[in-house]
Image (tube, rainbow, N blue to C red):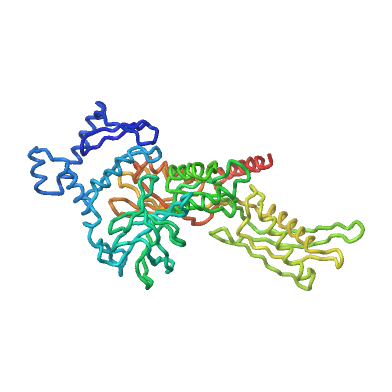
Amino acid sequence: EVRGVIDLVDMKAYEYDGTGRENCKEIPIPDDLRAQAEEYREKLMDEVAEVSDTLMERYLEGEEISHDEIVTALKDGTNHGDIFPVVCGVATRNMATNRLLDAIVEDLPSPVKHGEMEVSDHVALKPSEDGELFAYVFKTRADPFAGRINLFRVYQGVLPHDTQLLNTRTHNKERVGSLLTFNGKESVTVDEFGPGDIGAVAKLKETRAGDWLAARDEPIAMPAIKLPAPVMAFAMEPKSKGDEDKVFTALRRLQEEDPTIDLHRDQQTGEQIVAGLSQIHVEVIVDRLKSRFGAEVTLKPPRVPYQETIRRGAKAHGRHKKQTGGRGQFGDCHIEIEPIESEDGGTFEFVNAIKGGVIPQGFIPAVEKGVLEAMAHGPVAGYPVKGVRVTLFDGSYHSVDSSEMAFKTAGSIAMKDALAQAGAALLEPIMIVTLSVPEDAVGDVIGDLNSRRGRPQGMEPGPGGMTEVKAEVPMAEMLTYAPDLRSLTGGQGDYTMEFLRYEEVPSHLAQKVVEQAAEDAEAVKA
């Protein structure tokens, strides 16, 4: 349980009351943490002293280094990329946020001292008021009164109020009215912003997070900021039936504010999937849905989009006949099915081999519809059937009683019979997983991947002393991987994964999938 933080620069402790309102008090460093605090203070001073030879000499001679000297060294070291300050806190409880803001103001270098920054091969921005204006929109948020508000940082030039700027993504002009700065929920109107300033503007029509705004008329290509890929996905359901539209609209609003949120509907399972950078990230999304939009939802692991296929070919006959007076129904067809090799599991072919008009051309599409209807729920566990070629080679019809509906039913009957004969198999999605992990954690990570039925594909050195590991892993084993990787790597590991192909589920696991599918089907009926 986190109660507070220790400031290693001034060797002070701050305790928070847990209300999330920044109610904190300065206290003596607890006795049980003093030795550890002094150890980390010494490590901090070792790094700070490295910034300056003069500072190093004084430090080695045992002289006291003042607060201002430590702050100056932190700024210089950070500006040159030699020091990366870390501030501890609990964002979800608003704990130590004030210490973070103080550290940003006091310990980080002024943007003006950064010098020229190359953002692409043909654009370099200098933190000067004399240059052409460039501002980066880093966040968009929805305000219940002011509408959509864009927060930005000026990288070059001066941004005055009441002006027109070019959105470099859309190549359209945006009218900038009042400029705002925020202090918590309170906003203050200002006349202009200069290099390094962070401000806000409301009611821009097309601008969103990730856009560049420039004071120019000619289009210019500005690079998009690469955002981290979401890794933790959940299926999301409204707690109250009928709230689907309300939840979806709210999620879209939140996605505008936070482009690292991935929102989509799984085409096979029909589930609404929301994915974020971590489990806490998704939980914050859920909390915002409730507090800001009054929409309550439940989270659960997403269903794995299993598929079914066939191991061998088969022939089948389907006949639908109802003739009990008056116009009846009659459809008759013969089909042959065979497997098609397909890594993505999405292949289906329908071959019309009818000769001599034994089935009129107008009824052929109806047979195909019936075949596809039967393939929507396979014989193993009710999952869609893929990777099949279906050949319609014979049949018969009645000049009066035959209809599209009759041939659709006949096609469905024939396909169900053929699937029962063809040795159906269960398929699962295999993902290609790319991990970045500390070198000393590689062994544990690979061992964990092996336990998840993973197949490591190779390793190579990555940036920052990390090691890049690639592996093929079943999707079913990766649904809750993020917290496990965090535990294995001390919070330093990261990963992305993409769909690779479908493979047959091992027989000892297939039965569990079948049983779970049956339970899910019963739950839906109930």
Q: Position of residue 325 (x, y in %)?
A: 92, 58
State the residue at coordinates (50%, 52%): 253
Residue 317 visible, this orientation: no
Relative side of 116 to 318, left or right: left
Q: Nearer the viewer, residue 373 or 525?
A: 525
Q: Residue at x 67, y 63 (%)?
A: 390
Question: Which residue ends up furthest to the top in the rendered image?
Answer: 31
Residue 168 in the figure: left or right of residue 519: left
Give whichever of 326, 81 is nearer the camera: 81
Let me know if residue 59 appears in the view: yes
Q: Quadrant of residue 403?
A: bottom right
Give the camera-side residue of 181 and 153: 181
Residue 231 x, y percent position in the rendering: 44, 49
Residue 5 location in percent, x, y? 29, 35
**Residue 519 place in picture, x, y as percent:** 63, 40
444, 209: nearer the viewer: 209
Give the quarter of the figure containing the C terminus.
top right
**Above or below 461: residue 235:** above
Residue under the image location 37 percent in, 65 percent down: 163
Residue 340 position by quadrant: bottom right
Name the image quarter holding the N terminus: top left
Marks counted in the figure total: 0
